[in-house]
Image: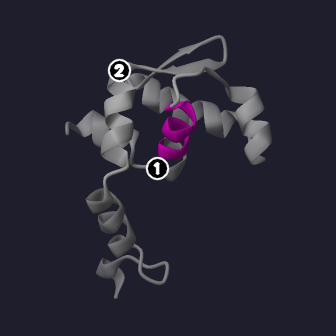
Amino acid sequence: MNRLEVVAIKHPLRVQLLNALADGKSLELSTYAKALDLPLPQVRYHCEGLAEAGAVSLEDGTARITDSGVELHRIAQRPDRRQKQDRRRNDGRDRRHR
């Protein structure tokens, strides 16, 4: 996995966006933000990060997953990736700060 792919799935909202797009349908960002009770700029920011990585195409406030995004979604769902993320978060603190 290259650095851009790592950055693309670094934030939980980006993984959540990929999950929402995984069925291949388009997603209107304003509707998605409203459904999750999140600010539209926050959703747009993370969607643009996915677009920069080539995981989604973004046009007129609507996102669609790309072939690269399908692969990235598959990587983000791997159990070993989720375990690593869980180990970093122990009681809300990073291990380095113990």
Asked if residue 31 shows in the view, the reply is yes
Residue tagged by mark 2? Answer: 67
- Observer-side mark, 1 or 2, equals 2
Q: Is residue 42 placed above or below 52 in the rendered structure?
A: below
Rendering colour mode: one colour
Considering the whole magenta stretch, tell me its main secondary structure: helix
Mark drawn on residue 84? none
Which quadrant is the C terminus positioned in? bottom left
Task: Identify the element where label 1 is drawn.
Answer: loop
Is residue 20 found inside the magenta-colored segment of the image?
A: yes
Mark drawn on residue 11? 1
Q: Is residue 79 placed above or below 21 in the rendered structure?
A: below
Q: Residues within 10 Å of mark 2 (few under 14, many from 20)?
A: few
Q: Quadrant of residue 60?
A: top right
Give, as a single range, the part of the protein colored magenta.
Answer: 15-22
Task: Name the residue rendered at 50%, 52% in the picture.
Answer: 12
Residue 9 drawn at (x, y percent): 39, 44
Three-letter code for the amino acid on which mark 2 is drawn: Asp
Question: How many marks are shown on the rendered structure?
Answer: 2
Give the mark nearer the N terminus: 1 vs 2. 1
Tell me if 37 is positioned left or right of 22 in this view: right
Asked if residue 53 shows in the view, the reply is no
Q: Real-space Cα distance between discs 1 and 2?
A: 20 Å
Three-letter code for the amino acid on which mark 1 is drawn: His
Q: Is residue 83 placed above or below 11 in the rendered structure?
A: below
Marks 1/2 in contact by CB < 8 Å: the verdict is no
Residue 83 drawn at (x, y percent): 32, 67
Task: Name the residue rendered at 30%, 43% in the picture.
Answer: 75
